[in-house]
Amino acid sequence: MAYNDGGFKMTIREKTSKEEILNQLAMTLTYLETTHGIEEFSNINIYLQIYKNDERQMLIDPNNPSKQSGGFSLKPETEHKTFETLADGSKKITYKKDVDFKRIQETIEQLIKQPALSKYKPISIKKVEEARNQHESYLKEQRKKAEEEHAQAMAERRKLEQEEKDLLNSFRQMIADKFNCDIRDLSVYTISMNFVTDKNTLKKYLGSIETPKEEKIFRVTYRDQTTKKAAYSEVYDLQKNLLNTIDIN
């Protein structure tokens, strides 16, 4: 027992029983009453670590294992003191001293019936920690798997991007060889060049072909050396076979 910020603290550190708790509580309250005349109390907080078969437990909701019962709050249901006005005008306070065991039993039965409390069941903290560790290990594995899949997807994406870049450069070199010029001078002979994958654009360039099967083609548009405007376009499959020539004029 110790004083704390004007209040009075009672501590039982070792494991004990309900009877011992009640005895210690009764002893402490009786001590305060008989020695100091203290018969009224407030802000009563009792924190208990609970055990079953000598193993520490916790109360959880079986339907929601992550939800743990933190206890409950009660308020007095009966008046614990009466006031009497004396002849001189002063007031006398009389505190109720008898323990109403019948009301205690009724209160316990009401608590047991409350869904908010009865849904909680005791479970070994050791088992809870084991389940949590297993769940954490599962989450860790899932995070690792997701990171690996993301890294693999990014590597595959970079590979495809590099392959497309290399393929585009090979087409650019093919056009440069056609004009016997450096790749850096292609703008002198061409307006633009790139791959085409849009279905409508594919149809535009391959519409004259009876059975177009290409899903991706290379298109280059040439510059008229006199007007410097677009003159015609050529489309190739990915094996650099000429598929069609489209006159723009």
Image (cartoon, rainbow, N blue to C red):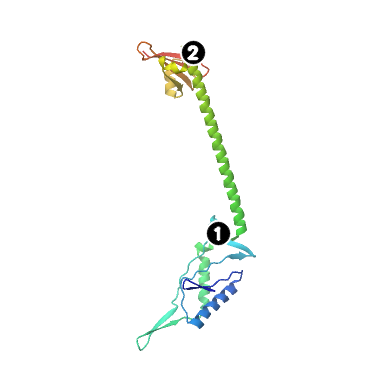
Q: Position of residue 173 (x, y in %)?
A: 49, 17
Please state if 95 lies on the left or on the right of 1 as rendered: left
Q: State which tag comes first along the sequence, 1 or 2.
A: 1
Q: Residue furthest top?
A: 226
Q: Label 1 sits on what residue type? A: Ile
Q: Residue furthest bottom?
A: 87
The nearer-to-camera label among 1 and 2 is: 2
- Identify the residue position indicated by label 1 in the image: 60
Judging depth in this view, the residue of 230 and 203 nearest the camera is 230
The crowd level at tag 1 (other Cα within 10 Å; few <14, some 14-19, many 20+) is many
Q: Position of residue 42 (x, y in %)?
A: 46, 73
Q: Position of residue 118 (x, y in %)?
A: 53, 63
Q: Quadrant of the C terminus?
A: top left
Q: Label 2 sits on what residue type? A: Asp
Judging depth in this view, the residue of 160 and 235 nearest the camera is 160
Q: Quadrant of the N terminus?
A: bottom right
Q: Position of residue 132 (x, y in %)?
A: 58, 53
Q: Measuring 50% from the left and 24% from the top, which residue is drawn there?
A: 165
| Above or below for 182 versus 35 | above
Q: Measuring 62% from the left and 54% from the top, which residue is drawn there?
A: 130
Is residue 132 visible in this depiction of the protein? yes
| Above or below for 186 versus 158 | above
Do the residues bearing badges 1 and 2 touch, measured as CB atoms within 8 Å?
Answer: no
The crowd level at tag 2 (other Cα within 10 Å; few <14, some 14-19, many 20+) is few
Q: Measuring 57% from the left and 73% from the top, which residue is drawn there?
A: 21
Is residue 214 visible in this depiction of the protein? no
- Identify the residue position indicated by label 2 in the image: 177
Mark pair 1, 2: CA separation: 77 Å
Dot 2 falls on a residue whose secondary structure is helix
Q: Picture quarter containing residue 193?
A: top left
Please state if 76 lies on the left or on the right of 148 as rendered: left
Q: Picture quarter containing residue 128?
A: bottom right
